[in-house]
């Protein structure tokens, strides 16, 4: 909450009528300067912080499911009794408050203390995590949260500690979020949590049988359990001019800083590729008042993911904000001040960003002889073909109980949740990964949320009106809903995800 914003709602310390909160209802009130969510669920009362610890989403607009509350914005899930962030993208707990019901009124009291984690496992056990991204960080955080007492080493070829990668194409790139929003945790956190974070370090070879990693500096590292979370790398363009200083890929904080540095003086940008990242970059450059042109071979942006109608909407949304599209076209050469298109036209450009997709980083796993299937094959516990070696995030292909297929996705929330589940499994708490795939994408003030997974569908139905920015779009195959995209229908999106979750739990 900003400093000048006063907390809203009734003063819960003075009590509210018990009849104002029916079973299954939530409301927001205040306790001193803090906004507090009060919920009645399964005959119990809970009072917790009213805002999600991810990006401050208003939890009262979310969904109660059993003993949890789900955030409307990006589906984080919190335990109402303990405040724990059970499922990413939120990682920090909600504050919990004392609550009581007497004489027909509900009263909220002071903050409850956060219970400290109970140490578990042997202090001599060694877990190594390769990858300092979504999955690797979430795994390390969960290990310590659940009291893992052994050593944790995290190896990352990045030069920065784990960052909020989705922000790199959105608010941070647009200039509306300060840099201190970007790290997932401050520098001290790693030492305080006894996580040996080795930056600028690459794992070059894995000996799965002897449980040993060789690093780029020639040293070796032994482990009892290993998590591979090497993510994906942007596909490079092999064409004249692609190596120039003003031509960028976007994956790391360093990449993003380089684009921002060029954006200080750039007047005209060409974005190659109408991918999520390409379009979000175009939107962020428009926020910096840079002319933005998107060149891509497809007829409609994101049609393969969202279908024609939503693809047309996304195109018109970007056009309303001044983005110029050059579709069914491609770039054949990049000059110092322009790019040449397949049609022979040229576009002036003093900044070029390539967003033509990513490839999973599989080399380490492949060379180690792990089972590969266009991704690292894992079982429902996220364990690879080698015992004690797990994989999570953009590299992992897992048996998805919702689609009944083995899938691999490139979503932030899935990577984090897989990291969390891999952590539990590395601690010996046999936990299958059954989360419903979820991602979001932000275009200006329009967020698109997507639950499930549909690589192919045979029908799409739209409930609501896409152009009015209020819709639920269902993707079906043989009558079964495989996935649902939504705009400003957050509760519906949460309910659909909860129903998918339940149908697997009861199957
Ligand atoms: C700009 C941008 C915006 C995005 N926006 C969204 C969004 O809005 N919504 C969404 O759902 N998804 C989004 N994504 C995708 C999302 O960030 C990824 O799906 C997610 O980061 C995958 O997590 P990961 O842990 O598998 O890999 P990563 O987060 O990529 O982390 C991989 C890590 O492994 C390290 N590494 C790789 N190989 C080695 C090695 N051999 N040795 C040591 N370290 C190694 C890398 O340096 C990196 O630290 C976005 C991605 C980008 C780049
Ligand atoms: S703001 Fe709650 S999950 Fe993102």
Image (cartoon, grey):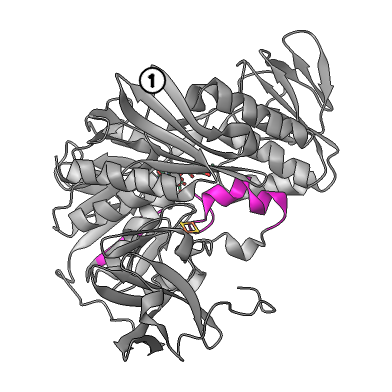
Percent x, y of residue 111:
39, 87
Up/down of 58 relative to 361, above or below: below
With 164 as the anchor, is 222 left or right in this view? left
The secondary structure type at the circle numbered 1 is: loop
Q: In the image, is 289 to the left or to the right of 53?
A: right
Locate the N terminus by quadrant: bottom right
Quadrant in the picture for residue 44:
bottom left
* Residue 433 percent across, percent down from the top left: 23, 46
Q: Quadrant of residue 400?
A: top left
Rendered-image quadrant of the C terminus: top left
Residue 170 part of the magenta segment = yes
Give the residue number, with chain letter if any, for mark 1.
Answer: 456
Could you say which quadrant of the image residue 297 lies in? top right
Specify the segment rendered in magenta: 151-176
Within-10-Å neighbours for mark 1: few <14, some 14–19, many 20+: few
Foreground pick, 373 / 412: 412
Indicate the position of residue 337 as horizontal and vertical percent values. Answer: 84, 27
Of the pair 304 and 186, the residue shown nearer to us = 304
Q: Is residue 312 visible?
A: yes
* Residue under the image location 53 percent in, 88 percent down: 32
Q: Residue drawn 22% across and 61% down?
A: 126
């Amino acid at each position: 909450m900003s400093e000048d914003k006063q907390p809203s709602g009734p003063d819960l310390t003075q009590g509210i009528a018990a009849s104002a909160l029916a079973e299954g209802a939530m409301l927001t009130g205040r306790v001193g300067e803090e906004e507090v969510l009060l919920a009645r669920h399964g005959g119990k009362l809970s009072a917790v912080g009213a805002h999600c610890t991810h990006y401050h989403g208003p939890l009262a607009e979310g969904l109660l499911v059993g003993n949890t509350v789900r955030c409307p914005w990006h589906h984080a899930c919190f335990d109402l009794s303990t405040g724990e962030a059970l499922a990413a993208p939120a990682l920090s707990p909600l504050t919990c408050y004392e609550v009581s019901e007497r004489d027909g009124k509900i009263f909220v009291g002071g903050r409850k203390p956060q219970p400290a984690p109970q140490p578990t496992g042997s202090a001599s056990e060694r877990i190594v995590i390769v990858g300092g991204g979504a999955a690797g960080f979430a795994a390390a955080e969960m290990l310590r949260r659940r009291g893992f007492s052994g050593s944790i080493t995290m190896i990352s070829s990045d030069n920065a500690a784990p960052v909020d990668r989705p922000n790199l194409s959105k608010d941070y790139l647009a200039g509306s979020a300060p840099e201190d929003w970007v790290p997932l945790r401050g520098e001290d956190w790693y030492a305080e949590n006894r996580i040996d974070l080795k930056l600028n370090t690459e794992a070059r070879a894995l000996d799965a049988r002897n449980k040993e990693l060789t690093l780029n500096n020639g040293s070796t590292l032994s482990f009892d359990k290993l998590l591979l979370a090497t993510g994906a790398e942007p596909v490079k363009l092999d064409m004249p001019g692609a190596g120039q200083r003003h031509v960028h890929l976007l994956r790391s904080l360093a990449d993003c800083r380089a684009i921002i540095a060029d954006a200080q003086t750039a007047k005209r940008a060409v974005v190659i590729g109408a991918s999520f990242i390409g379009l979000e970059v175009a939107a962020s450059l428009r926020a910096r008042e840079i002319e933005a042109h998107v060149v891509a071979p497809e007829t409609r942006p994101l049609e393969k993911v969202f279908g024609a109608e939503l693809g047309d909407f996304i195109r018109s949304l970007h056009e309303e904000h001044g983005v110029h599209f050059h579709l069914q076209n491609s770039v054949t050469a990049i000059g110092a001040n322009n790019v040449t298109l397949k049609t022979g036209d040229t576009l002036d450009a003093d900044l070029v960003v390539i967003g033509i997709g990513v490839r999973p980083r599989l080399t380490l796993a492949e060379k180690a002889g792990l089972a590969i299937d266009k991704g690292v094959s894992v079982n429902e516990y996220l364990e690879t073909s080698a015992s004690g070696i797990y994989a999570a995030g953009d590299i992992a292909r897992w048996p998805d109980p919702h689609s009944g297929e083995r899938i691999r996705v490139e979503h932030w929330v899935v990577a984090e949740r897989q990291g969390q589940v891999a952590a539990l499994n590395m601690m010996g708490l046999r936990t299958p990964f059954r989360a419903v795939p979820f991602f979001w994408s932000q275009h200006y003030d329009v967020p698109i949320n997507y639950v499930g997974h549909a690589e192919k569908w045979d029908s799409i139905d739209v409930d609501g009106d896409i152009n009015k920015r209020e819709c639920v779009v269902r993707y079906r195959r043989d009558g079964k809903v495989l996935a649902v995209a939504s705009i400003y229908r957050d509760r519906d999106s949460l309910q659909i995800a909860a129903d998918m979750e339940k149908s697997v739990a009861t199957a």
